[in-house]
Image (tube, grey):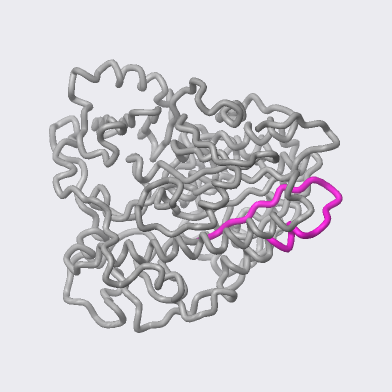
């Protein structure tokens, strides 16, 4: 239900992010053994569940930068985690989502990961400059060393693993363990309780409260009670096709994909199911933390006048497509959990139309009665909250300069600069095992979806040199307090 909004009765916004959460959530049906009672209950008691939501870019930095700035990666040039959106001419000219809410009478508050962390020449930038009030996260897991498994260190259950040539790989350290801290002392739970306190408080202005939950991001650390939800002898591995890439070829007819070191190390050590179990434990831990936020809202004086936006920044592979992590244009990497609760919603509704996190900015402006910003790349999905079955156009995900995927209700069409094309019929092939791009029967589908492929791809803004980054690291966790005053001096539109 979309409520009419006047200047004096604007709703609050509770904006909740989770990091690296894929569709392995009960209401999204990605894994039959997932235990996420709080998210399931949230959906059941009143929310629009977007079953076909996708990210602007399948990596933390590009996805978060896009939804916060309102501009796609191909517009700003923010294609990777090393690129700070502050370097984009668009972010220098236009207010980010929290800044625009602050300009229009909202009190903006944040804790946890909402934007991706970067270094500036003055220290650490975690997006604190976007908010009227920002707080640092605290807490940790203090892992039990005997339970540690790490590909990077070649350790299995605290002991050295057999020699392997697959221990080297890119990205965050790939490891999991049981955390020895009490759940009340962990960072995400402390952030959740902080959010609940903010919701209990009286506020003189409508508020925009952005809360970031860091799990299930690597490393997969969670406390014992969440591991115990998944018996050690269970089978948690997803379906995997070892011949998945035989039909994904470049212009020369050669395969363009191969299994990653993460996958090969886990496979040779028989750890694919155990890794999935570790991820599921983190998923349930994140769900528990979210439950504390939802309870805080239910008991607050703002429960009847708060829009809740729940979102993950992108999907995550756990062996599907012979790989782990994110960063790809397959649906397991682009599809993200997303739900919206409007005041007055009393039951679950599902929407199969393709939407994108880039649509948050214009949608929230419409829902909260703020002035429109026609320059934004996204499209308000507010109409879908009233009629989730109406016609809607496809959505786009960008993964690096020149690469993109286009999703509609049935198809995922991928085009890359190496000349490879992939077309998957998600209705009949949800795991994307059969590439139909070279089949003439489906050329009309490719032609229709190609119309949504980005027309241009911006160059990336400058990044810090290695020397500048090393110098910035000397500041450690120092908060860069120069950015917000500089932003306030700008005539941001």
In the image, residue 232 sits, relative to residue 111, either above or below, namely below
The answer, for residue 68, to whether it is visible in the render is no
Residue 389 lies, in percent from the top left, at: 50, 25
The mark total stands at: 0
Magenta range = 196-214
Q: Nearer the viewer, residue 23 or 43?
A: 43
With respect to residue 58, does 127 lie above or below?
A: below
Residue at the spot x=41%, y=48% of the render?
A: 23
Task: Identify which residue, 57 or 12, lies in the foreground.
Answer: 12
Could you say where residue 107 lies in the image, as x and y percent from the top left?
78, 49
Magenta-drawn stretch contains 467: no
Residue 69 is left or right of residue 322, and the answer is: right
Magenta stretch encompasses residue 207 = yes
Q: Quadrant of the N terminus?
A: top right
Residue drawn at (60%, 43%), measured in percent from left and top? 46
Residue 87 percent location from the top left of the image: 57, 44
Residue 203, position in %: x, y?
Answer: 83, 53
Whether residue 14 is visible here, answered yes or no, is: yes
Residue at 26%, 38% in the rendered image = 432
Name the residue rendered at 69%, 51% in the picture. Answer: 209
Image-based side of 375 in relation to 454, left or right: right
Q: Quadrant of the C terminus?
A: top right
Question: Is 137 displayed left or right of 153 in the figure?
Answer: right
């Amino acid at each position: 239900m979309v409520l009419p909004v006047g200047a004096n009765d604007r709703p609050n916004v509770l904006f909740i992010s989770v990091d690296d959460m894929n569709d392995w959530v009960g209401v999204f049906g990605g894994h039959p053994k997932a235990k996420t009672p709080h998210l399931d209950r949230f959906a059941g008691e009143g929310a629009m569940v977007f079953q076909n939501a996708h990210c602007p870019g399948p990596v933390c930095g590009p996805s978060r930068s896009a939804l916060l700035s309102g501009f796609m990666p191909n517009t700003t040039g923010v294609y990777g985690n090393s690129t700070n959106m502050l370097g984009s001419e668009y972010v220098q000219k236009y207010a980010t989502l929290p800044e625009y809410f602050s300009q229009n009478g909202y009190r903006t508050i944040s804790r946890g990961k909402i934007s991706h962390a970067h270094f500036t020449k003055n220290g650490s930038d975690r997006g604190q400059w976007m908010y009227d009030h920002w707080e640092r996260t605290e807490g940790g897991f203090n892992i039990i060393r005997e339970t540690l498994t790490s590909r990077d260190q070649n350790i299995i259950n605290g002991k050295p693993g057999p020699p392997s040539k697959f221990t080297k790989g890119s990205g965050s350290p790939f490891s999991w363990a049981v955390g020895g801290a009490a759940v009340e002392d962990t960072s995400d739970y402390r952030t959740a309780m902080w959010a609940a306190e903010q919701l209990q408080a009286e506020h003189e202005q409508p508020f925009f409260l952005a809360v970031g939950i860091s799990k299930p991001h690597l490393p997969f650390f969670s406390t014992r009670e969440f591991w115990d939800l998944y018996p050690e002898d269970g089978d948690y591995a997803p379906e995997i096709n070892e011949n998945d890439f035989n039909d994904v070829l470049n212009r020369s007819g050669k395969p363009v994909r191969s299994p990653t070191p993460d996958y090969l190390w886990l496979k040779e050590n028989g750890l694919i199911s155990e890794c999935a179990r570790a991820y599921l434990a983190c998923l349930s831990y994140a769900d528990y933390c979210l439950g504390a936020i939802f309870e805080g809202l239910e008991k607050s004086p703002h429960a009847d006048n708060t829009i809740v936006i729940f979102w993950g920044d992108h999907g995550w592979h756990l062996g599907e497509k012979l790989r782990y992590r994110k960063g790809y244009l397959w649906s397991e990497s682009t599809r993200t959990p997303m739900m919206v609760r409007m005041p007055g919603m009393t039951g679950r509704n599902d929407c199969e139309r393709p939407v994108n996190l880039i649509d948050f900015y214009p949608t929230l402006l419409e829902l909260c009665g703020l002035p429109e910003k026609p320059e934004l790349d996204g499209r308000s999905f507010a109409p879908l909250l009233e009629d989730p079955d109406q016609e809607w156009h496809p959505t786009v995900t960008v993964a690096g300069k020149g690469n993109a995927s286009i999703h509609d209700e049935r198809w995922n069409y991928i085009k890359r600069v190496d000349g490879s094309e992939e077309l998957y019929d998600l209705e009949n092939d949800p795991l994307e095992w059969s590439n139909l791009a070279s089949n003439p029967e489906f050329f009309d589908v490719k032609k229709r979806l190609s119309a949504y492929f980005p027309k241009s791809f911006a160059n990336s803004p400058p990044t810090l040199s290695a020397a500048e980054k090393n110098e910035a690291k000397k500041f450690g966790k120092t908060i860069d307090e120069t950015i917000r005053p500089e932003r306030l001096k700008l005539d941001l539109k």
